[in-house]
Image: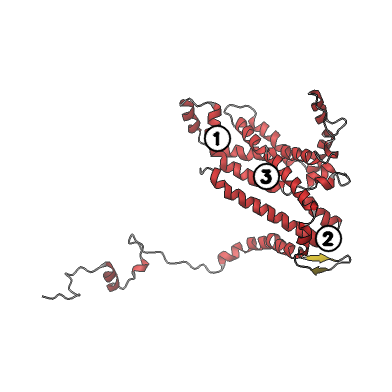
Amino acid sequence: MTTSTHDPRVVASPEVAAARQGRSTRSRRPGGQRRPPLRRDGVWPWLFVLPLFTGVAVFYLWPIVNTAYLSMTRSGPFGGSTFIGFGNFTELVADPQLYTSLGNTLVYTGIVALGIPIAVYVASLLNLPGLRFAQFYRVLFFLPYVAMPTAIAMVWRVMFNGDFGLVNRALGVVGVDGPYWVSDSSTAIVAVAIVGLWSSLGFSVIVLGAGLKTIPPELYEAAELDGASTWRQFRSITVPLLTPSIFFVTIITVISSFQLFDLLYAILGSANPVLPQSMSLVYLFYREGFVNNDKGYAAAVAMVIFLVIGVVTALQFRMQRRWVQDV
């Protein structure tokens, strides 16, 4: 006996049943729920984000493109420019001032980065339960960060004075004969880096202190019940769970350190004879563009700074997978 496919006793597959009812299975989710129809909002979302895109394009993307073009030109003594391709970069690679300024920038960045573990320890102390005047101490640490670099430089120039400066007087107490800090090519960039470390410490303390607030106190209570010492709690709980904030502070510190200019210029001064041996990458850009009036060569220096910061930041993001803990 043969049965027809239209016999109601025959159990049809879901696909056949859906086809009989005039519905497509592609309009349903695996759970049997109907997919919501796609919304077409038109151009209104783009109109709302257009001001943001315009600002990014005008103030960020266009300067980068324009600087890249200027780096391939040579300015004339009476204005105008001539396209020379990669001539400025070829000349820059052979310029020993590039490597001197790059080395000074790396030294400055390395010394300032030493303030990050100091900031971790200070932020942990300020986060101790029951500490009195904790907010006042945070304000004291943060004040140098918001102070004007020129005012900071004037104070520290007096402190670094080789004859009557407070730094050399303190070293003399322990029997050390201090150098002429800002007049010696071997110590000038170190003196500037010490000031940079001091002035940036407050920002790191505030950010790391906010990160400490996110660590559950129950972890410390459990560790204390297990007999863990304060140092063991700091090493096994505080530092691992604080690594996202430490990573953020590291990124900001490195980028800002590679942009060293105002503090160096204010402390050393433009007439300092050790400035050519102590200049940073940004100061090299300033000298070529605004003192020597070579806009194309200065633009090439700016592109080198841009590439160096981009490579260093990319390496940091690459390496953060190994030591930053997911919270």
- Disc ID at residue 158: none
Quarter of image, res 295: bottom right
Distance between the alpha carbons at the discs numbered 1 and 3: 21 Å
Q: Nearer the viewer, mark 1 or mark 2?
A: 2
Judged from the image, the secondary structure of the residue bearing numbered disc 3 is helix
Q: 47 or 35: which is nearer to us?
A: 35
Dot 2, how many residues are within 10 Å of its Cα: few (below 14), some (14-19), or many (20+)? some
For image coordinates 36% across by 62% down, the residue present is 29
Q: 56 or 301: which is nearer to us?
A: 301
Can residue 211 be seen here? The reply is yes
Q: Is residue 288 above or below residue 226?
A: below
Dot 3, how many residues are within 10 Å of its Cα: few (below 14), some (14-19), or many (20+)? many
Judged from the image, the secondary structure of the residue bearing numbered disc 2 is loop
Q: Is residue 252 above or below residue 194?
A: below
Residue matched to label 2: 294
Locate residue 272, reporting x and y percent: 87, 44
Dot 1, how many residues are within 10 Å of its Cα: few (below 14), some (14-19), or many (20+)? some
Residue matched to label 3: 253
Can residue 213 be seen here? The reply is no
Mark 1 or mark 2, earlier in chain: 1
Locate residue 158, reporting x and y percent: 84, 35
